Amino acid sequence: AGAAAAVPGMEDLATAATMGEAWAWAGKGPCNATMLAKLQDYRDAFLSKVEASAAAVAAGIVPLAVGTDTGGSIRIPAAYCGIVGLKPSFGLVPLEGVFPLSWSLDHAGPLARNAEDAAILLSCLSCTPMPINKVALGDIRIGLVQSHFSTSALGRAVTDRVNVAIEKLRRGGAQFSEVSISDLDFANRNLIT
């Protein structure tokens, strides 16, 4: 696990990875002009700023990135890229400079290659210490909403991978219990109206 570090000029890479647009924290540095030009040449291939940032973190182009999340825009690209993406608790990270989509759902949060680096960036963004406490698997309880696991042909592969992870955690001592959330199907059907 690498440690996060501030590198002069790294803002250019983060800005380039977000299609040349900056949010609240982007700036300009003297180095990386060649990389900036190369990334800007490819900016049309990126679907969104957060997806591009997640790809840049996963590829090792930048060590960390900040994303914004209203309906999954940090977490989904992070999952696709195999990195850590965290939507923090409401109000933990200030949103000055972020274009508002939904005042109660908008969040800014870290994208990183590991949990330790995500905690460091979240600590910087929130000005709040974010210690990582090691916990034994036997002390962890996990609730599963198995009724929400996909059984479709496409989703079945994801469900199978989740079940493999559950079994590994169970063998390690983690405790699981089935969770039922009333009206979850109704909420999902009416989430965007």
Image (spheres, helix red, strand yellow):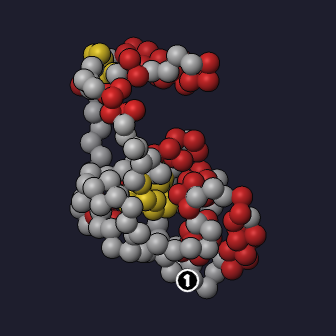
Task: Residue 171 in the image: state x and y as whole percent.
Answer: 39, 14
Q: Is residue 89 above or below residue 33?
A: above
33 sits left or right of 132 in the view = right
Give the SS element for disc 1: loop
Q: Which residue is mark 1?
A: 28
Residue found 27% across the figure and 20% down from its top:
179
Q: Which quadrant of the view contains residue 52?
A: bottom right
Residue found 71% across the figure and 63% down from its top:
44
Q: Is residue 124 above or below residue 37?
A: above
Residue found 61% across the figure and 85% down from its top:
30
Name the residue at the bottom extreme.
30
**Amino acid identity at mark 1:** Lys
**Is residue 1 visible to the viewer in this orientation of the structure?**
no
Question: Count of labels shown?
Answer: 1
Task: Residue 128 in the image: state x and y as whole percent.
Answer: 23, 62
Question: Could you say which is closer to the camera, residue 77 or residue 121?
Answer: 77
Question: Could you say which is closer to the camera, residue 186 or residue 130?
Answer: 186
Quadrant containing the C terminus is top left
Q: Residues within 10 Å of mark 1 (few under 14, many from 20)?
A: some
Name the residue at the front extreme.
193
**Is residue 133 visible to the viewer in this orientation of the structure?**
yes
Residue found 38% across the figure and 74% down from its top:
97
